Amino acid sequence: MTSVKVVTDSTADIPEDLVEELDITVIPLNVNFGEKETYKDGEKLTPSGFYEKLQESDVMPTTSQPSPYDFETLYSDLADSLEEDTVIFSIHLSSQLSGTYQAASIAAEEVSSKANVEVIDSKGASYSFGIIVTDIARLAKRGANRDECRERLEQLIQASSVYFIVDTLEYLQKNGRIGKASALVGSLLKMKPILSLNKKGEVYPYEKIRGRKKAFERIVSQLEETYGKQPVHVGVAHAVAPKAVETIFTDIRSKLNVTSEVTTEIGAVIGSHVGPGTIAVIAAPAQESE
């Protein structure tokens, strides 16, 4: 029976304890401050270190994906250490937001004679696909085969939800990731746009709400409408905004059938594009056996 090994990239923003518990292999993206300072996301630059540096820096950080060679090396090394019939599920940041998926796909072709790699475009960003990665890794750890993991993966990509609020659209705009939310620039005033990702993996404006508190209430209301009493996993990812997290979870727990919850920090790469103060709320159907 074909077993599954899960690989992802650092933009999944999965807490380190879950990465270790579920034996997930993470390849880092790069964060650049000018031409001379380059850091590995999550390795050489932690979320807290990044936001401190962002506040001090005069330049807007840029980001770059791992090279196909980086992926080739990773896949080859894994193939040497895994059982022969293992398939690598390499699940990555939306191809609409980064070239990571493309680099991984090129590498998978190059190592196809040695490693069995399936590269998946999650259509998500940050923990909106981290929640999918951890679910599949947990399933694989229980002994699920390739087809079972593939079926679950496709279900989650369709059935998971993400809504997020940024303090400013400046970072999305300057880094070119604003997508269909571009119409909101210059028209916010006291409005707080609820943003989301569409099925293509692009940022789009879900709804404009007056005030942050009401925006979060609307998000929870929408999640309740989507999932009802269905068991769900819930994650809240934040960019140096920890005080709001517990309030959000309290409301979520009162409205949804939450079987597990995760709080995580938005790392340096995604943080470069959304900026400090961002909070994302993510939900996905729980596995039937849970």
Image: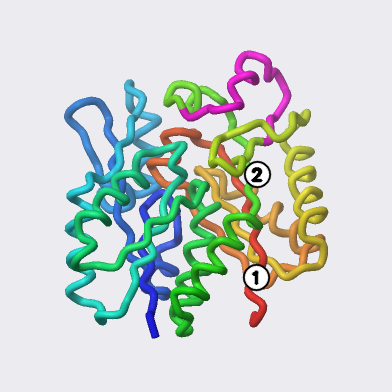
- Which mark is on residue 8? none
Residue 45 visible in the snapshot: no
Label 1, secondary structure: give it. Answer: loop
Q: Position of residue 235 (x, y in %)?
A: 60, 58
Q: Quadrant of the N terminus?
A: bottom left
Q: Position of residue 74 (x, y in %)?
A: 22, 60
Tell me where the magenta segment starts and ends, as one range.
177-194
Left or right: where 139 falls relative to 24: right
User: Residue drawn 30% across and 51% down?
Assistant: 104
Q: Quadrant of residue 59?
A: top left
- Give the residue type at disc 2: Tyr
Q: Which of the two marks, 2 or 1, is nearer to us in this view? A: 1
User: Residue drawn 29% across and 45% down?
Assistant: 103
Farthest residue, direction top: 186
Q: Quadrant of residue 200?
A: top right
User: Residue drawn 66% across and 31% down?
Assistant: 205
Label 2, secondary structure: give it. Answer: strand
Q: Quadrant of residue 15?
A: bottom left
Q: Nearer the viewer, residue 213 or 107?
A: 107
Q: Which residue is labeled 2 in the image?
A: 163
